[in-house]
Amino acid sequence: MASKTFTAEMFLDVRCRHGEGPLWMESGSRLYFLDIPGRKLHLFDGALKAYDFDRQITCVLPTDKGRFLASSFDDLHFWSPEAGLGPGLLAASPPFDADIVRHNDGVIAPDGSLIMGCLHMDETEPVSPIYRFTGGHGVRTLMTDQVIANGIDFSPDGKTMYWADTGTGFVYRRQYADGGISSKEVVTWYDPKLGGRPDGLCVDADGDIWVAILGGGRVESLSPKGELRASVSVVGASNVTSCCFGGEDYGVLYITTGHVEGEERSGAVFSCRPGAKGLPPNQFAEGSR
């Protein structure tokens, strides 16, 4: 069956230096997204506003207590608009060498834990972990062989974990159960010489994977076996960084981008209705072990 093609429209005329981490919250019809080097969390709920941080925050995810779990480069924090950024939650040093590795992208697993991916700062060495963090502040390293762990998400039944390694161009999957994972399998590989690298991703309600292609000006939808289902062009912004589904029916694909000199729409947020629907985000279980 031939793949479908779509074109995203500009949704928010913002100019993020590096937009990331789109998050749709059904309550209040709120779209959150980060400008990581700009040290801002943007919120659109009919009007656009921004919250400033005193450091770079790489992802923000909801908890079951009505606040958010945020990752700085080397720690985790609770955050709310009222209380601001709380103290670090990692009791010991982070589960990586913070001189060469930092936090990058994360997701809340179906069991309520955080799955946190990290990156090698020089973006060359496969030494970055993906680890699990629970509400009891327990840490379990799941793997340590990533260059840039990115775009982690789960199948609708919660049994399969998907992610990208932007540093190598691979999209992977692993079976996930009881906080542990099986050996990884390749979903697909993107050759950066042929049109970009995989960055953030999300999984829709049918189990297809939507992958933002950094440097490729598009989002691609893949089957769990890696077959191309659809392509969404993002005209005027080649550094497509991440995506999520939202809107009242979870039928809108929101797409973040990063600034590229000479690309006048780069850094904006785009949207498209590609005929698929997403699912509400999981919430971090603050009391879980």
Image: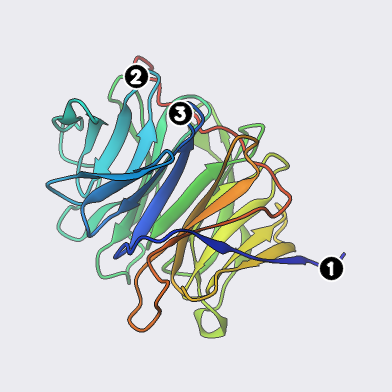
Q: Amino acid at mark 3?
A: Gly
The front one of 40 and 107 is 40
89 in relation to 98, above or below: above
Question: Percent from the top left, x then y, of residue 226?
Answer: 70, 60
* Residue that mark 2 sits on: 286
Q: Secondary structure at mark 2?
A: loop
Q: Nearer the viewer, mark 3 or mark 1?
A: 3
Q: Amino acid at mark 2?
A: Glu
N-terminal of the pair, mark 3 or mark 2, is: 3
N-terminal of the pair, mark 2 or mark 1, is: 1
Whether tag 3 and tag 2 are in contact, CB under 8 A, the answer is no
Q: Of the numbered discs in the image, which one, if any, rests on residue 28? A: 3
Question: Percent from the top left, x then y, of residue 210?
Answer: 61, 55
The front one of 120 and 261 is 261
Q: Residues within 10 Å of mark 1 (few under 14, many from 20)?
A: few
- Between the residue at mark 2 and the residue at mark 1, the CA separation in whole angstroms equals 44 Å
Q: Is 102 displayed left or right of 201 in the figure?
A: left
Q: Residues within 10 Å of mark 3 (few under 14, many from 20)?
A: few
Q: Residue at x 69, y 55 (%)?
A: 274
Q: Nearer the viewer, mark 2 or mark 1?
A: 1
Q: Is residue 66 visible?
A: yes
Q: Is 114 displayed left or right of 90 in the figure?
A: right
Q: Amino acid at mark 1?
A: Ala
The front one of 134 and 62 is 62
**Quadrant holding the N terminus:** bottom right
